[in-house]
Amino acid sequence: MASKQPYTYSDTADEAVRATCDDASICKRFATSKGYWTDLYAQYFVRQVGERKAPEINRGYYGRVKGVNLLLDAFLEKTQCDCQVVNLGAGLDTTFWRLKDEKIMPKKFFEVDFPTIVARKIHHIKTKPPLSKPLIETHSTDSLLLDGHSLDSDRYCIISADLRDLPTLEDKLKKFQINPELPTLFLSECVLVYMTPEQSSKLVHWVADTFPTAMFINYEQVNMNDRFGHIMIENLQRRQCILAGVDLCQSLDSQKDRFLSAGWESVNALDMMTVYSMLPQGDVSRIERLEFLDERELLQQLLQHYCICWAVKDKLSLGLSQIGF
């Protein structure tokens, strides 16, 4: 059984968390190269397709991407894109470019991550025209605000910040003109689990207090108290990656309680096996033909240990609580 390590701030632990950014990007790059979904921009952040990933990993990422996108796109539809999106721990995510191509961009798209990751992403954008051109096309003046650790345009902004340092996060978002009165969607994927329960609860509390009309989508581990969950924890610990917030990943109820106790009006949570079964089944059938899956039980185990939790506050009565699968 995995022993819980006491959580301490350490460069080693933070570096291990930063490395998960590369893991996710490499896995998404491989899955898109196999045709699981289309991402025209991942190639500019991860050049090599890399070594083969197991089919259950590819299907897991497919469910994650499609599930999160379904909720995000529904929010954009409900708000008629008169809104903001804040991607917390965004890594090398390409969502902004997808939304631009599909003509469903919010008023402004913010990304937040550690300074080293932000610096890398800005370097990719600066040096690769397919990434920079969409920013320039949506910007009204000749020059973008750009330095090593932040980039700001009319519609897209990258900020370097530690999510555990709320005053600095708030100051930087204000500096780059976030508008608390606009409907705002916060998105985090395998991010809160690396913060202590107290830290992540403070963060979701701050969002609820600051943004009267908001939605929060959180994708991360769940059902972590069984043997499979303990093996996941042990594997991450071997890489110095400590799941500081795993206590809130015990069940769908513990995931929901974090938001309910922080003042969110309605909260839903589904494990990814359920989400996978609720995605458009024509496309699911298509991707299941891409690679032979030897053991479906392994896919089920994997998907039962991840979930999507989404919470809403709806002062403007936009019908945000109707969003779901």
Image (cartoon, grey):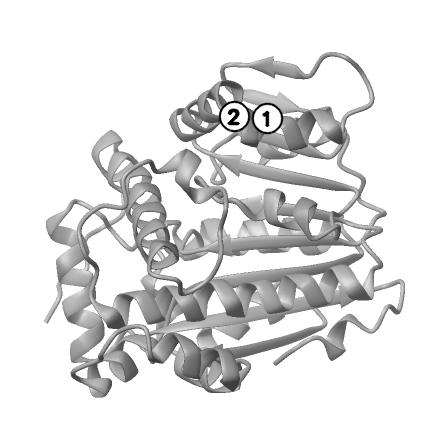
244 up-or-down from 14: above or below: below
Residue in the foreground of this view, choosing between 43 and 166: 43
Question: Left or right: where does residue 27 sit relative to residue 215?
Answer: left
Residue at 48% from the left image edge and 19% from the top image edge: 127
Question: Residue 267's mark?
Answer: none
Residue under pointer 2: 125
Which structural element holds mark 2?
A: helix
Residue 26 pos. (x, y %) = 30, 47
Which structural element holds mark 1?
A: helix
- The image quadrant that residue 9 belongs to is top left
Q: Name the image quarter holding the N terminus.
A: bottom left
How busy is the neighbourhood of tag 2: few (under 14 within 10 Å), some, or many (20 plus)? Answer: some
154 up-or-down from 202: above or below: above
The CA distance from mark 2 to mark 1 is: 5 Å
Residue at 17% from the left image edge and 70% from the top image edge: 230
Question: Left or right: where does residue 288 sit relative to residue 261?
Answer: left
Whether residue 28 appears in this view of the structure is yes
Q: Are marks 2 and 1 in contact (CB under 8 Å)?
A: yes
Of callouts 2 and 1, the N-terminal one? 2
Residue 304 pos. (x, y %) = 34, 80
Residue in the foreground of this view, choosing between 239 and 168: 239
Residue under pointer 1: 132
Residue 62 pos. (x, y %) = 41, 67
Residue at 48% from the left image edge and 44% from the top image edge: 93
Residue at 61% from the left image edge and 49% from the top image edge: 98
